[in-house]
Amino acid sequence: MLGFDVGTARKVWTAFLIALLFCIIYIASTTVLVIVFAVFFSYLIYPMVTLVERFRPRRLPRVASIALVFVVVVALIAVVGSLFGVQLQDQATRLLTQLPALMRTDVPNRLPLPHFLEPLRERIVDFLRSQIETGSDNAVPMARSLGLGVVHAASNLIYLVLIPILSFLLIKDGSQMRDAFLALLSTRHRRLWSEIVGDLNVLLSKYVRALLFLSLATLICYGVAFSLLGLPYAFLLAVSAGLLEFVPFAGPLAAVAITLVVAVFSGYPHLLWLVIFIGLYRLFQDYVLNPYLMSEGVEVSPFLVIVGLLAGDQLGGVAGIFLAVPVIAMLKIVIGKARAFHSAPHDEGDAERRALTGKTD
């Protein structure tokens, strides 16, 4: 009578709750990020847990097999870090130290440029030199700030400890948590959210494992090829490319740019072979390996990917860029399932009423 519509009020209330949820996530971004990384780590570990469970004696509890996998994985990460961390640090320090000297050589004058840019070669080279020299002058303050950042990260090592602990608990109690969540819903909505949770589980498991395989493939292929081609700082560039593979779209482009810049300013003589290898590998990665590994559930249009990357960078920096694609894919699943659920008849009575209405009309 007063113009109050119950349906509109429910929609407004739902929109308010969603906005409040996003606000809480933004405020507690550090905690949410730790939980997200714990979830991703769980999806990486879970296949090994299922493999160990096949050979687990029945008298041993499931917790024992989960704990065994976590101990082995953490020990393996520690061993790999101790073996290759020194070499990685040595190459990074050497590159940072030699970069100003490399810029004073005649190598930049031999940069391959298009014919129409040849008259501007001197200005381009001077601009590049000034930019790198400015960066080298700031190397000491940057190193100081980097040291402070390391100290700050060391003070927050609790988060690194919490990630495997939370992953352990997620694997151990994940099914009970899912059942408890579904039990809170009505019978009508339980079916919808059961399908959504199942699809999200498939999406995240395939996405996280695909990213891991893509990163390892890039690390191994770049490392072997760069070593065979005699590229300076081969291990450092390969590790950088492997880590940047976790950042969709922008990461591989940044890895290619960094590799070519280091090769050019190091006076690498086989630049053409390097470009051919990188071009062939990116074609294989982007059009064969990537579609094969991400064949289910991660189909997001390039427009949405770019918009998501820009928005993720504004909201959360590198972490936001990393999470942009899976978040968009998850929203796509939730919206699609919700639309299909609300457009379909919910029970036989609804189907009969719709059929009668259609006949009457």
Image (cartoon, rainbow, N blue to C red):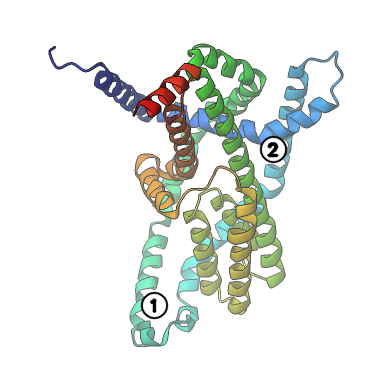
Disc 1 marks a residue whose amino acid type is: Val
- Residue 247: x and y, percent? 51, 49
Q: Relative to residue 265, is residue 17 depicted above or below?
A: above
Q: Secondary structure at mark 2?
A: helix
- Residue 121: x and y, percent? 38, 83
- Residue 140: x and y, percent? 42, 53
**The N terminus - image quarter:** top left
Q: Relative to residue 181, is residue 288 depicted above or below?
A: below
Q: Is residue 4 visible?
A: yes
Q: Quadrant of residue 146?
A: top left
Say whether residue 329 is left or right of residue 160: left
Give the number of the disc on residue 63. Answer: none
Distance from disc 2 to disc 1, alpha carbons, whole Å, reads 43 Å
Q: Relative to residue 305, is residue 26 depicted above or below?
A: above
Give the number of the disc on residue 78. Answer: 2
Q: Quadrant of residue 338?
A: top left
Q: Secondary structure at mark 1?
A: helix
Q: Which residue is mark 1?
A: 125
